[in-house]
Each structure stands twice: as structure tokens, then as C-alpha cells.
Amino acid sequence: AMSATRYTRDEVAKHNTAESNWIIIDDKVYDVTKFARFHPGGKAFVDASAGSDATKNFYAFHRQDVLKSMASKYLIGTLVDAPSAKKASVTLKPGELSKVPYAESGAFQGLPSSFYDESHHRFRADLRKFFDERVVPDAAANDAAGKPPPHELWKEMGKRGMLAMRIQNGPWLEDLVQNCGVVLPGGITPKQFDCFHELIAHEEFCRLGVPGYCDGLGAGFVIGIPPVLQFGNPELARKVGREVLLGEKRIALAISGPEAGSDVAGLTCVAKKTPCGKFYVVNGVKKWITNGHFADYFVTAVRTGGPGVGGVSLLLVERSEGLETKPIKTSYSPSAGTAYVTYDDVKVPAENLLGEENGGVKCIMH
């Protein structure tokens, strides 16, 4: 709870040393004396603002979320002479939608819509509350530190149906609800779920505003699991679909390679069938694979036939002996798990073929 103590600006100004460092942010007073030495930007940066109004400097480098997740423990009071004390607060409660014009889709700010009904409003409110309470507090810090989203968060999102909400509807959704105990956000049913619910799910994930961490929460998943569900044999699609949609295992799409980038027709990663016909043996490398560093499955484009698009197949490769990943440095956060993937005589069951042999490009472009 916020301290009821009120201070004048002159009182705050007296605490202007490294030994007693008070600052003002948004007319609230914080004692950051102990925090200064833990500040990611260095102690000197915090000490330079001692005894002053640091609001402008704070917002130049931080999101408002930091005040809720980190700064609240250092809050000691408010200003007596706060000129903005009569202004309405813009701090939103968890799950609350913004009233700032154009900050939300028009349908969620009172405008009529032919596409959104009451189920969409409940759906967004449920997702917004979850992200505000469970994801936002750690997202920015983990993105800056390069840490991927914890696996436990994946599992929690899976059990709440939040992973399945990011791909199109299908029999897998009914299976999760009927057989896996999943309750969809907002209490919607699989029959109610439409492309606008999916759109809302993508909007709420992206609203985090930290690109690396956002991609770490499933950028590989949303393009990796659909080929399995659409083109895998029924047993494979059911088993892997459940594991991935429940967040128990993670998946990545492995198409791009260092020799051809994303030019599918030019890829050189090779898969050869064993004489018994029960396995493919995969050799080659993939590069820039989002979520690859922590993925359990890799939907991998391989060459099984001649040159060009007519010789490409799609295999579901499980992380196993001969498959190694290492992180790749990119222009954004390592939280995304972007990886260099090496396949060295990796044995893949023939049943893991997605679609038809040499028909992989059709699956990729579906």
C-alpha cells in the first residue's frame, strides 16, 4: 500500500546525496538510496537525479509498467504541492481497457461493430487481465536480460487455452476442452471461437511491447504447429498437438538455412530414407530459427528429391541425438531463442513425414 506521508518539494530536495537519495516521479516520492547500486544503468545515473523531479528522465528510458512492478517497493509518499494531483490517473487496473482515444480497437471503445459481440469483449478482458498480472511484470526485465519466457508460463497459458487461441479453429480445440480440461478465455466455447477471437489473442500478446520476449512466447509456435495439425497423420497430430497446445513441449519452424536464406527451392538440408524404409536420416543446418534454442520439436524442410521445389519434404524432427542448437546474436533480445540448428545423422521415423514426400512446399504455403 502507498504511504500516506506527504512531502514538499523542498523536503525532497534535502535528500540529494548518494547516502540519502529521494526522487520525484509523477508527483510521488521514492527513496532510491539502496536501489541505486542495483540499477541496470549504473549507480551514478540514479544519484545524478537525487533530490529532484526525475519524471522526464524516467519516462525517457522506462515504460510505466516499471512503476507497478519495480518502483512500488521504494515509494514513501506523495507531494503536498503536487500541481497534477487533481488530474485523473492514467494508471489502469489489471484487465482494464484504456480510455485514451485509439488506444484500443474502436469496437472496444463504444463504437458499433458488425464483427465483435459480447464474447469478444469477455475474451479480451480475460486475456488482458492475465497478461497484466502474470506476464507484464517480468516481460521487460527478461527481455533486457535476454531470458526466454519460463516454461511454467507456457504451461499455464496452455492450460488456459491461450496457445490454442493463436491458431485457427479445428478439431484440436474441441479435443483440448473435452479431453484435457482446458477452459477457454472468457468462457467461450470452441464453436464460438472465430478469426476475430484469434485476432484479439495476437493483439494482446503483441501489446507487451517487448519484441524479443513477445517472439519468445511463441512466434515459432504459431507457424510451427499448424503443419503438424493439418498434414500430420492423425496419431501424430493428436499426440504432438496436445503436447504443444498445452505448453508441455515447444516447437519451431525450421526452413531458413545459411546457404539459401528462406529460398525454399534452394535449401540443401538433406533427408535420406533408410533401406528398411522406416526412417529418414537428416543432415544439414538451419539458421535464424525463432524459438529454436529451447524447442522440443522442429518442423524441418528437407531435400528428399531432386533440385527445386519439387524435391522438398516436410518432417517433424524431435530434439534427439545428433540435433544440436546454439543461440544466434540478433538485433533484438535473445529472449526469442533464435538459433542455429545442426542435424548430424538425426533419425526421424517415416511416420513423421508431414504431407506427401516431395510435397513439402505445398504444406509450407498452405
Image (cartoon, grey):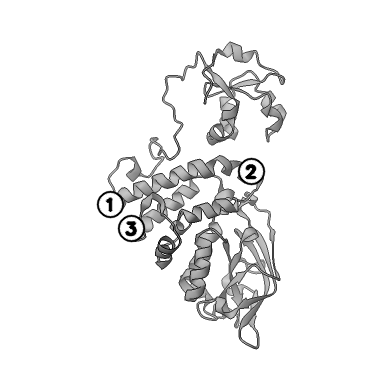
Q: Position of residue 349 (x, y in %)?
A: 60, 78
Q: Quadrant of residue 296?
A: bottom right
- Sequence-first tag of 3 and 1: 1
Q: Check disc 3 and report the residue beneath it.
A: 192
State the residue in front, 349 or 253: 349
In the image, residue 85 above or below residue 190 = above
Q: Position of residue 252 (x, y in %)?
A: 58, 63
Give the label on residue 160, or none.
none
Residue neighbourhood size for the residue with mark 2, other residues' Cα within 10 Å, grouped as few (<14), some (14–19), many (≥20)? some
Q: Check disc 1 and report the residue beneath it.
A: 114
Q: Position of residue 274 (x, y in %)?
A: 65, 85
Q: Check disc 2 and report the residue beneath it.
A: 144
In the image, residue 296 above or below residue 120 = below
- The residue at the point 54 percent across, 56 percent down is 218
State the residue in front, 160 or 318: 160
The outermost residue toward the bottom is: 275
- Sequence-first tag of 2 and 1: 1
Tell me, yes or no, if residue 51 can be seen here. Answer: yes
